Amino acid sequence: MRWLRYLNQWRGTAKEALEQVSIVAKFLCLIHVTDRYIISSTHVQGPSMLPTLNLTGDVILTEHLSHRFGKIGLGDIVLVRSPTDPTRMVTKRVLGLEGHRLSFSADPLVGDSSVSVVVPKGHVWIQGDNLYASTDSRNFGPVPYNLIEGKALLRVWPPRFLGSLR
């Protein structure tokens, strides 16, 4: 009997604690869904997107909806899962959509030899802005559309470069 009285005494406290834990869990779920499926910040660095993005790194806002609705266009900067190393993300510019014919220099350091390619269905052609220091579609070919993880909206860090990425 004493045990039941003790249990009733803590019932209200336990219920309130459970409600608070539920609120925190819902909030964390909301943050996860927002970050993974709607918009997130991403730290990007490296020479391949010079001069658009800094060598030492920028923080960009990336939205994750456009590619799900087929709204990626020419000139968009996208985050792509690397076709050669699926654990890495790369940031490149879309230069060709399915059906587009592209000509590019096979090796810009060596000479003028040009190669033409047609982007197949369900693929995009991506290249870094810095042709001399970018591993991109010129190396691994057209990229499957489903490897696109998001579209860069704007740079948020460093503050002096805050703004659009066009």
Image: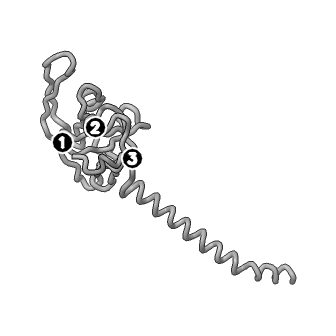
Residue at the top extreme, as displayed: 110
x and y, in percent, of residue 63 in the image: 32, 54
Q: Which residue is mark 1?
A: 98
Q: Is residue 13 above or below residue 165?
A: below
Residue at the right extreme, as displayed: 2
Q: Residue at x 25, y 31 (%)?
A: 130
Q: Residue at x 55, y 66 (%)?
A: 24
Q: Secondary structure at mark 1?
A: loop
Q: Secondary structure at mark 2?
A: strand
Q: Is residue 111 above or below residue 163?
A: above
x and y, in percent, of residue 105 in the image: 17, 24
Under mark 1, the amino acid is: Glu
Q: Considering depth in this image, is 123 or 88 the residue closer to the camera?
A: 88
Between marks 1 and 3 in the image, the one whose residue lies nearer the viewer: 3
Q: Which mark is residue 42?
A: 3
C-alpha separation, residue under disc 2 versus residue under disc 3 = 21 Å
Q: Which residue is mark 2?
A: 143
Q: Considering depth in this image, is 109 or 98 the residue closer to the camera?
A: 109
Q: Considering depth in this image, is 4 or 128 the residue closer to the camera?
A: 128
Under mark 2, the amino acid is: Val
Under mark 3, the amino acid is: Thr
Side of 38 relative to 67 (left or right)? right
Q: Few, some or many C-alpha atoms within 10 Å of disc 1 (few <14, some 14-19, many ≥20)?
A: some
Residue 91, located in which quarter of the rendered image?
top left
